[in-house]
Every structure is written in C-alpha cells, then in structure tokens.
Amino acid sequence: MKKLSIVIFLITLISSNELFAQTNNESVDNKIEKIIKQLTLKEKLDMCHAQSKFSSKGVARLGIPELWMSDGPHGVRTEIDWDTWSHAGWTNDSCTAFPALTCLAASFNPDLSYKYGKALGEEARYRKKDIILGPGVNIYRTPLNGRNFEYMGEDPYLASKMVVPYIHGVQENGVAACVKHYVLNNQEHWRDHINVELSDRALYEIYLPAFKAAVQEGHVWSLMGAYNQVRGQYCCHNEFLVNKILKKDWEFDGVLVTDWGATHDTKQAALYGLDLEMGTGTDGLTSSLKNAYDNYFMANPLLKMVESGEINESVIDEKVERILRLMFRTNMNKTRPFGSMNSQQHFDVAREIAQEGIVLLKNKNKFFPIDPEKVQTIAVIGENATKMMSLGGGSSELKTIHEISPLEGIQKRFKNATILHAMGYASGPSVYGKVIDSKLNADSLKNEAIKIAAKADIVLFVGGLNKNHHQDCEGDDRKSFSLPFGQDDLLSEILKVNKNTAVVLVSGNAVKMPWVNQVKGIVQTWYLGSESGNALADVLSGDVNPSGKLPFSFPVKLEDNAAHSFGEISYPGDGTKQEYKEDILVGYRWFDTKKIKPLYAFGFGLSYSEFDMTKASVNKKEYKSGDVISVSCEMKNTGKVKGKEVIQVYVNDVKSSVLRPLKELKAFKKVSLNSGESKTVNIEIPVNKLAFYDDVKKDWKLEPGQFKLMLGTSSKNISKTIIIEVE
C-alpha cells in the first residue's frame, strides 16, 4: 500500500512538472485551457471561494498556488487569523501607512498616484500578497458616509484620472489591484441590503466612469463588488452591472471578487458573473457547519447544481479561466519582482503625497506660514494632535512601523518655540462597531486647554474627526455634520481668550464650521499616514508651499448637500430602498446649477504664493465628433515663493435638449512655477467627452451647438471663458 502511494505521488509530480514544462513557451490562453482540462469539478469550485479569511485554494497536485490577498488601500493590513477577524499576532507585519485616498485625490497629481501605487505594490509583494484590496472610487455623495476617506472625491473625471496610475503602479509588482466597491456603495448605513434606484444617466455619467477607466485604461486585474443592491439585484451577482456592463461592454478580463459576505444566491452568483466568493461565513470553520467554506454559495450548493445539470460546467470553467489568468499575472508569473517593505523611499513617497494633498482653506492676514525661527509660545490643542489614525477605520486599519503625530512633527520643526499641549477633548477608545465614551473628565480637559491657550502667542487647534465608529469608519455613517466631542464649544471658548487661533482639521469628510469667520486660518489635512506630523510641519512652517485642492465641496449646512435635499428616501433611504433624486447633480454640479453657495468649493485651495492666468486660447473654434480640443493658457507665479497651481477646465453646454450641469470638470493639470516664472500650459479634451448619456437611446449623445470652456483654479474661481462650436 505504501509503495502504491509513492507511485501515485510520483505520477502526480511528473504530470504536474510535464504540464508546466510543456506549456512554458505557449500562450497563457493555451496554458489555461490545458490546466482546466486536468481539473476535477470539485477542484474548480474550490478555486472559486475562500478557504480562509483572506485566501482561496489552489490545486496542490498540479502545482497551482493559493491566492492570498490583503486589505488596503492605504497600506498592507496586519495579518489576520485563518478563521477569525482577530489579529494573527505576527511581529513582522508592520507597514508604511500611506495617506488616505482623499489626500491623494486632493493632490490633483496623477504622477503621485503612480508613485503611491508602486510603493504600495512593492510592500504587498514583499508580504507575498497576490491581490491588494484597493483602491476605492465610490463617489462622494454625502459628507456623512463613514467611508469617504477611502475614496477619491465627488467628481468622476478626477477619480478616473487618479485611479489609473495607481493601478499601473501596483500591478507593475505582479500584484493585482482590486478596485472597489462596484458600484453605488455610497453610504455605510444599511450598506448590506439597501436597494439603490437611479437613472441610467446618473449611473453612466457619475458613478461608473472611474470603474470604466480602471478597466479600460488601468487594465485592472480584479474588481470587488459592493454590498448593496441596485435595481433589485445584489451588486456581486447583478446581471446588468456585471454581465452586461463590466464583462460584455467593457470587456473586463479579470476576476470579480465579492466584498466579504456580499453573496446571497447560488444560482445568481453562478450565472451573473461572480468569480470569487469571499467572507460568506464570518466565523469560518470554528463554530458552525453553516458557515464552513464548503457550504459557501459557490461551493457544495453550486456543485450539486452542476451535477444535476441545472447549471452547465462551462459556467464554472469561465470563472476558473479568469482566476488562472489572474494567477499567471501574479503568483504564477515567475518574472515578477520581489518587492520591498518600509524603505526610506516609501516613507518619502508617503510624505510627498501628504505634502501635496494638504489643503489651505483660510489664511487671514497671512497667518501661515509660521516662522520656525521665531521665539514664541505655541499652544497645540486637541486629541487629534496625538491620536494614531492608522489604527482605526475598519478594514483599512494598519499597523504601521511608525506614525509621526502632528504634535511630534511641530515639536521637531519649531525648536525655537515653546510648545504647549492639551487634549482639550477626548473621544474614547477606538473599538470597531461600537461607540465608547471617554472616561476622562470633559470639563477638566476643556479648562486645561483654555488655560494654555490664554498664555500662548498662537493657538493651533488640531481637531476634526477620527477613525472611530460613527466617524470616518467602515460599518456605519456619521450621525452629525458637526464636529464631535464638544469641539465647537471648546473652540468658541478658546477664541474668547486668544484670537490668534487657527484650525488644523484632520478628517476624510467635510464638517460644519460655525467658527469659520472667527479663526485666522484653516488647514485641511486628511489622514496622512506614517509621515503625518512631518508633512504637516513642512506646510505650517513654509518649507513646503501648500498646493492641495478640495476633491469635494464643503456645504455650509448639511441640507445644502444634494443627497440631503430630497428627504429620507434620498438619504439614507427607508430601510429597504433609496432613490438618488439629485440624479446627475452631485457635488459642485448641484451647488453651481442650483446657485447654492458652498462654504468651500470643489477644486479650491490656497497657496503661500499668488498665480495669474494671463492668456487662454484653443487651436480652433469649430469641432466635430472625434476631434481633440487643444486648450492652452499662460500661468504666472506673481508671488514671492515657488509654488504649484492646478489649472482646471470645466465645460458648459450652452443650449441642451436635457438638463446639464452648469459646469463639468473635463481636464486639469498641475504646474510648478518659481517666483515670477510664467509657463504655457497645454491641455487636450476629446470632443466626444462633451457628450451626455441619453436615457432613451441608451448610449452617449453629442449634440451640436455652443460649448463654454471655463478655465480656473476651482469650480467657483473661473478666470477665462472660451466659446467653441461643435458640429
């Protein structure tokens, strides 16, 4: 019996080696075809669902490896247990924490997006991950969405341009990016079941473009489906979204992965495009048969359907073909690089992204930059000055090798100043899925903060949100548009004793600012990752001139936001469904078209320098479909320091047969200018990008007539307007 086992093992080993020897010089498609012929039905299905929290099975007898994935998108998540959500307790899984994607989007710099993806991909590769679960490109629809900090803002064009280089950077390392969450996962509240109803125009013009760019321009190797339903079907097995749009229209050749536990039906999963089912049972094999991996929807239940003839085995073959193609791009690609972890280069990339993403919102009487050589007393007040932000937020949590706090960065850069610190407020411990009040005495914290504010030359209030539950965190949305933990009241009291106060906002969302007219300055810093404090100090001191621009609008009050203007059915829904009643008028499209003044506009951001657009022109005045509009303008730095400015080109259809927004971003370019320097900036816009989606034709439509090209430095600050004619 023992000899027979050895013989069987040797035959299996030889057949496995022969398989890969024979196919070494063949095309990947031929290799995949040969492998599929050797797989049993059970082996095929095992490749289509999880075997642990973050892996799926390979086929050991053929030398096909397991697929290993990790959460992102801001770094490689700490290792998780095989069957539970507990940390595995490794000592070598600390990573570089990169800034949140809102910060990346605020940089308006696609070159930085590539650097981000490349560095993240290197870290994922070193950790032996085949798929990194990110980036996220769901559109910012409401400032209450707990997960907005993981996404790239409210504009589909900006998100499209920023996601593509990120994907390229990641995948150069032989690691698949997994763009998420496809699609319309625009809130966390009721995310696991809410049914979204919207027009085709809103779907195609606002919510799909970044995913389309990821597939057709980024050539992304995997996508993650969303939890919610769209038009009555769950996103991970939605016939219209997956079979028609993603796989047929866009010709996506990668793998559609579920979000964890987002599969609901075996037959729909099989027939409506799902390839890899993850996380259906949250307790794995540890406590109940019901959730064991063999009982996933795409495991034994699907096996029975195929064996009975209800579903053809060719359906399974198509899924396995996609998974094998992903493997040949990742863990069966023998030429992929080895990766690297926590290098100085990675920390430098994180710092650079943070520097360019920080947005200066207010700078009264040139409060900033603060002279680091001056001898003075600076009061740094706020829990966010010392709180580690990489730890929370849900699945995007990170165990970073270091995180420089804002206080630490300020202390290091402003060595000639006396730095005082008080918490001022406390949020309580960070516990995923729960809100726990702080045990610290709120009055004592407040009194201490007011005391040090009164004796300081300047006050930096470092507040905002954090990554606790009901803040910027996966699992649910914010409960209020206002700052939490009594910060507004605390700021009011600080301003009574020291008018020389500025606010450093740490958040991934817009917040209400009742104190906006009283403070001297406002800096929006996002979640900046490992180099947070260093990057913040770089900007506060003037070592770096801020150049970030808001990737979403800040409303004065919540009711000014489009999603909140139509009652409960629009947001958060009635518990069963919701209707996107604002249609295509999302973000600045709503504010501009409805003539509602935002607190801070999309694309807005100040500099320590000044810029002037002196000329603007186009290559010709009349265009037809298929042409490219070549726009040029001259930008001059009229200030005293080197800086960067973002030229933004918006388009308006002067006379349309349908409602169109007053402005739509169609191009942007970031330019660096020395003091006194001028540059001619050229930007191209394909004429076909001026089309709208026709709900009747079910296709894009370019109408003849006049279009305005509006050049400026924010959606509200337009310097030059050019009128063109489209045939």
Image (cartoon, rainbow, N blue to C red):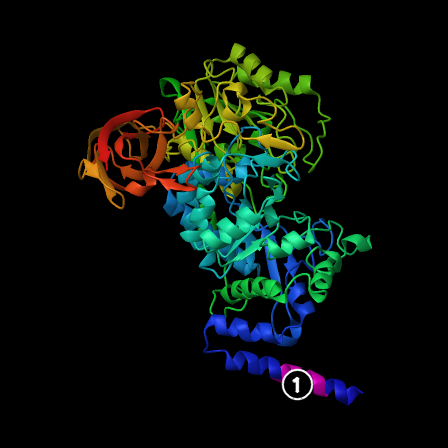
Q: Residue furthest bottom?
A: 3
> To which quarter of the image does residue 591 belong?
top left
- In this figure, which residue is indicated by the disc labeled 1? 11
In the rendered image, the vertical position of residue 1 relative to residue 607, given as above or below: below
Q: Residue furthest left?
A: 620
Question: At 51% across and 27% down in the image, what residue appears?
Answer: 505
Q: Quarter holding the N terminus?
A: bottom right
**634 sits to left or right of 363:** left
Amino acid type, label 1: Ile
In the rendered image, the vertical position of residue 489 relative to residue 275, given as above or below: above
- Is residue 98 at least partly visible in the picture? yes
Magenta part, dominant SS: helix
Residue 677, x across and y down, in percent: 21, 35
Magenta includes 453? no
Residue 184, x across and y down, in percent: 55, 39
**308 sits to left or right of 222:** right
**Camera-nearest residue between 374 and 384:** 384
Residue 300, x across and y down, in percent: 74, 61
**Camera-nearest residue between 657 and 480:** 657
In the rendered image, the vertical position of residue 235 relative to residue 130, given as above or below: above
**Camera-nearest residue between 126 and 602:** 602
Q: Quarter holding the C terminus?
A: top left
Tell me which segment is drawn in magenta. Answer: 7-14
> To which quarter of the image does residue 465 belong?
top right
- Is residue 342 at least partly visible in the picture? no
Question: At 57% across and 74% down in the image, what residue appears?
Answer: 35
Question: At 48% across and 55% down in the image, what residue appears?
Answer: 252
> To which quarter of the image does residue 594 belong?
top left
